Amino acid sequence: DAKTTQPPSMDCAEGRAANLPCNHSTISGNEYVYWYRQIHSQGPQYIIHGLKNNETNEMASLIITEDRKSSTLILPHATLRDTAVYYCIVRVAHSGGGADGLTFGKGTHLIIQP
Amino acid sequence: DSGVTQTPKHLITATGQRVTLRCSPRSGDLSVYWYQQSLDQGLQFLIQYYNGEERAKGNILERFSAQQFPDLHSELNLSSLELGDSALYFCASSVQGQGGEKLFFGSGTQLSVL
């Protein structure tokens, strides 16, 4: 699976949009971009994933550049409860239960300021 | 609530002992993943099972073993425990949908080895 690069930490004011970048310049054509987050000592939580097109769900939006070498996770109206470590992961879509574990890097520690 | 149940939530034991951590996946999920998270390490993938069979191995020590039973619940066995095994242990189950695999994590078992 391709490696990703994320800033170690970011601040964002409550109520503003939080934009979290991720570089994945070695991504392959069949690899998806996944985002998870982990609120302190809780289990990681799936947020969103995409292949080529931009995606939106009730939690966030995912913007993937046309060359797919980078992406941005957008939390449109950040709240204090969004303070967490956010992980960007690139992985081949597997069938039949996959062939490897999902590898988490160090992620970005997003701190929402009141 | 992710639908993944882990028991016990907390476990305190002594060095040299053996413990068993239990995980019940979401209804219908065939894959179970185990992860370890210690204070100075990120989320480390240990092992994955799919429908009762071992599918992938990560950084799992020989003192650790796991299995997935016919009812799909899984157990992680840790033996000859050392102080360094103190960590949060997470279990996740996954659903394979169109365009990728989403992992859903339990709330973890906090293991303290004294």
Image (cartoon, rainbow, N blue to C red):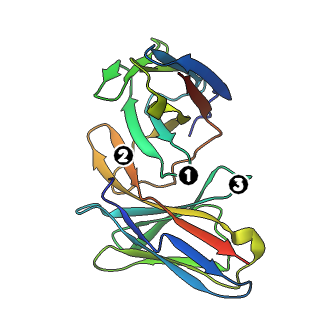
User: Quadrant of the rendered structure where residue A112 is?
Assistant: top right
Is residue B37 or residue A84 the one in the foreground?
Answer: A84
Q: Nearer the viewer, mark 2 or mark 3?
A: 3
N-term mark: 2 or 3: 3
Tag 2 and tag 1 share a subunit: no
Q: CA distance from mark 2 to mark 3?
A: 25 Å
Type of residue at label 1? Ser
Classed neighbour count for the residue bearing mark 1: other residues with Cα under 10 Å, few (<14), some (14–19), many (≥20) = few
Type of residue at label 2? Lys
Write the residue at 74% across / 84% down. Answer: B15
Checking the image for residue B102, the label placed there is: 2
Residue B97 image position (x, y, % from top left): 27, 44
Chain to which mark 2 belongs: B
Tag 1 and tag 3 share a subunit: no
Q: Name the residue that disc number 3 marks.
A: B39
Is residue B62 or residue B18 the one in the foreground?
Answer: B18
Write the residue at 31% across / 22% down. Answer: A56
Asked if residue A67 shows in the view, the reply is yes
Tag 2 and tag 3 share a subunit: yes
